[in-house]
Image (cartoon, grey):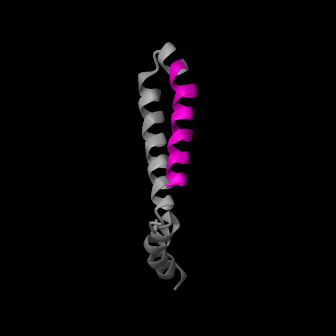
Amino acid sequence: MWVILGILLIAILIIVLEVPPLLKKKQKKELGFFLLLLLCGSGLSIAQGFDVNIPNPFDLIITICKPLSDLIMK
């Protein structure tokens, strides 16, 4: 539980430090993208805090490229 609280506090700190300059410069697209990435990163970190098995993206790349590699190498 403390890990999740820590992650949320750090995410809030990042928002407090990074969002006001983006709003001052009227960078709406950058703000949206920043919040999307922060939400994804925080969500994955919280999932790891709950010991959820998160698959490695490299496994998907291997699954896709391995048959192609085998085909080319033969």
Residue at position x 50%, y 82% in the image:
70
Q: Is residue 27 covered in magenta?
A: no
Q: Which residue is drawn at 54% across and 82% down?
A: 73
In magenta, the rendered stretch is 1-20
Q: Is residue 52 above or below residue 14?
A: below
Write the residue at 51% across / 31% down: 15
Most common SS among magenta residues: helix
The number of numbered badges drawn on the structure is: 0
Confirm whether residue 9 shows in the render: yes
Q: Position of residue 63 (x, y in %)?
A: 44, 74
**Residue 13 magenta-drawn?**
yes
Q: Can residue 25 be seen in this view?
A: no
The correct choice, above or below, for 69 with respect to 21 in the image is below
Q: Which of 5 and 28 is in front in this view?
A: 5
- In the displayed structure, 20 sits above or below 15; it is above
The percent position of residue 51, horizontal first and vertical second, equals 48, 66
- Please identify the residue farthest to the front as the structure is shown: 2
Q: In this view, does 60 lie above or below 14?
A: below
Query: Where's residue 72, x and y in %?
Result: 50, 78
Residue drawn at x 49%, y 48% as measured from the top left: 41
